[in-house]
Image: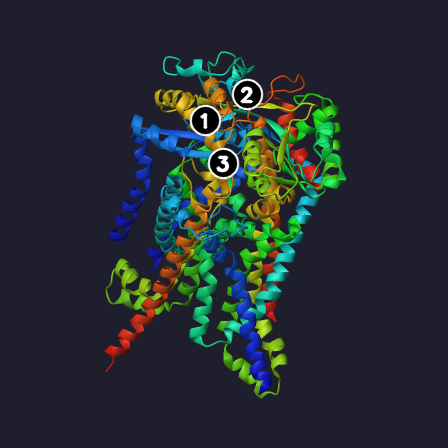
Amino acid sequence: MRTRRTSKIFSSAYLVVILLFIYLPIGYLVLFSFNEGKSMTNFSGFSLKWYENMFSNRMMIESITTTLIVAVVATVVSTVVGTVAAIGLSKAKRILRSIVLEVNNLPVMNPDIVTAIGLMLLFISIKLQLGMVTLILSHISFCIPYVILTVMPKLRQLDDNVAEAALDLGATPFKALIKVIIPQILPAIISGALIAFSMSLDDFVVSYFNTGAGINTISMYVYSMKRYNLSVNSMSTLIVVVVTLILILVNLIPWIKDKKSQKEEP
Amino acid sequence: MTKKLTAVLLLICLALLPVCSLAADTLNILNYGDYIDDQIIYDFEKEFGVRINYSTNDTPESMYTKLQTGVSYDVVVTSDYMIDRLIKENRIMKLDKSIVTNLDQLSDSVKNLYFDPDNDYSVPYFWQNVVLCYDTTKIDPAKVEEKGWAILLDPELEGHVFLFDSPRDIFMMALKALGYSANTENKDELTEAFDWLVKMNQAIHPSYVGDEMIDGMAQGEKWMAMMYSGDATYASMENEKLAVWAPLDGTCIAYDNIFIPSNSANPEMANKFINYVLDYPNSLRNTVLTCYTSPNAKVIEDVTAPGGEFDGVESYVPRTDNEKDEIYTDNELLRTETPELLVKVKLQ
Amino acid sequence: MKSFIRMSYPYILWIAIFIVAPMFMILLYAVTRSGNSTLTFTFTLENFGRFFSDPDFIRVLLNSLRIALFTTVFCLLIGYPAALLIANLSEKAQTMMLMLLTLPMWINMLLKTYAWRGILLNTEFDSELKVFIGMVYDFLPFMIIQIHTAIAKLDPNLLVAAYDLGANKWRSFLKVTLPLSVPGIISGITLVFLPAVSSFVIPKMLGGGDYVLIGNLIEIYFQQTGDWNFGSAISLIMALIIILAMWATRKLDRTSQED
């Protein structure tokens, strides 16, 4: 019995250490956002000045809004296009499906710098000026594959007979789609959308090579910063808070739904 | 399906709104990082009713790449040799001197530059030279002054040196130490410089960084740095143990000028902006915040006068009396070879 | 059902433009000679020759492969036990752990690397070690999650059956859990090794200019030298290495599945 307890302690300790490692830089960012001085190595006192500083830094705020707009648009478009494509591909001939899926894998497997440069060369050769449009287009390009990769497995698990039955009962293909297929794969769609969103938020290289004048994402802004600017820490802290809230919400909603349905059952 | 489609299209339109806003009066500016007092931007916007899209880049080469990819900037700041190249390639619009009237405020030290002697295309924005900034408590000043760039071969400095990760400047140090021109077109001289740098790299294993070294030196992280005089000014003012020295074997004097690319969409406003930053009050606050040397004669006079912000700070105004100092010229050999050679130096 | 196939057509068009065409552009630049504003169509393999004949470039390639390998192995060694331990927790605890692991993924990689730069400034570590730490940090969650997904899918009855047949914990792990978790290991390796090889931000921010990996090399040729042809050639070489690695791991996966 002692070995069981020690092994339990050991396993908890192991996981705690890993979590500490994962949250070390985040904690560091948050800590130094309250620094009195401007150093990232010496904590000299408590101050909220970097938060004030952040709000008056227009370029930083703009980088945040740009990042968000791009992420939202890219997520919406790639989720729609990706889901539609996945449904279409699941019914396609094997050969076509495997070829398309292989090509679809390229942006996922390719180093992001190769994807980024390829897109830049494309835009230049068709004389499309680099700017917000190219930025969004390039994000959509690398997001769609992730949606497809998430949705496809779920589609394969689907029982074809249900959709066939709907069609037999007189439903139009469109209705069958909306009322039968999509609800069944909805969890995968949402999961795919979340992955696409996080991929877009996390990107740096593709954005770096494919934007134009004055358009910066958060990552580009941080990269181009010359010296330490602890407003970046303030910005990071806010992002951490928002993300935590969102994740809590996302996880609470099914829990609340469960409770509701429990109540409804007699 | 149609509902979803409309929603998506709406979102796309919303996203393109920032693009549409470019129809309003905007000015796209590309500058070096930390090279302006942000307040100047906000004040200009208010005074002239324009919206400024401000971007930064870290080297003339990356600026050139951006121009090549067709991005339209209205105002750009970059260094002398790159402007030389752009003028020759017809990528710079001539200034409208009826708008840029403050040219008479320029200091003599920044006039008659080889690439644009009459300021037809560009106006000096900041200028500087490349210097050694070092901790006097760790390194004997006499040694530094005697050895010049060759002090970087001293194994005692191992692990304690910052070098700016700029191929041309690093090669300049080597070429000067060997007594050659920083603008050499001689492959053999370049090879000798390469060997010198390999020796240097193996002797002191420097840290090749960007602007992190500015705060780094101010906080005493290393004993010595090769840096731009403006940055050295800032660091030495923050950390009194630091001294600044321009080696007698010669260094480079760099002029960062502001110009209007030929594909600018808003040249009139661009000219106004150039005139605005050149003007006394704006040049003054620009230099005070960034510590880079102003091109404005009266500003220099005032800040170096007793009681001025840079009174007694020797590094503030680059020396102009050493014959061995050079300005970079555009040079295909150095342009194409030095980045690759620098990578190789680091690998030896 | 047939009408559904048509739904995939728009995407096929998209792929042609945004995935195939860019790769084609890189290929085009890689096999032609310099002059990047006007493509001079002299086909040549000199860019590849230039890369492979230079021992310094080979060194960069080997350095990249090496650090990617170390990062991957380390993530595997640390991540596998973590995934296993998490899979043995209660369902609630598992969801909590997974949430905690995925939260940092929503915070931009540059912000976290910037934080590491601050943390590592207090240390006297070697550039390579700093880059290694940064990479392990960035990729560890991916490895843990991939392995966990595979382990969590396993039928617990399999283990019960193994115990019934007299195997102890260690043996049943070795003979049941481990082999069945291989798909997870493989996708974890893929998600770590490939991006690690091509990483350029982490080496640049944590290693300083001293540590040059292949991603940095590509950036130098595109941004500094302006030699887009050579830069594209290096990109292509890297892409090919990665595709080969993927193909090899896929084969491994298939053979292990056949067992």
| Farthest-out residue, front | B306
Q: Is residue C220 above or below residue C1?
A: above
Q: In this rendering, which labeled residue sits more in front, label 1 or label 3?
A: 1
Q: Could you give the CA–CA distance between mark 2 and mark 3, rounded to whole angstroms?
A: 23 Å
Label 1 crowd (10 A; few <14 / some 14-19 / many >=20) = many
Name the foreground residue: B143 vs C115: B143
Q: Are marks 1 and 3 on the same chain?
A: no
- Say which element carries label 2: helix
Q: Is residue C124 above or below residue B291?
A: below
Nearer to the camera, A146 or A254? A254
- Return the mark for residue B85: 2
Q: CA distance from mark 2 to mark 1?
A: 14 Å
Residue B258 as seen in the image, left or right of residue C42: left
Of marks 2 and 3, the one in the foreground: 2
Callout 2: chain? B
Which residue lies under the disc numbered 3? A121
Q: Are marks 2 and 1 in contact (CB under 8 Å)?
A: no
Label 3: state its secondary structure: helix
Chain letter for mark 1: B
Badge number at residue B76: 1
Q: Nearer the viewer, mark 2 or mark 1?
A: 1
The quarter of the picture where the N terminus of chain C appears is: bottom left
Lateral position of residue B196 relative to residue C139, left or right: right
- Along the horizontal axis of the image, is C64 left or right of A115? right
The span from disc 1 to disc 3 (Cα, nearest Å) is: 23 Å
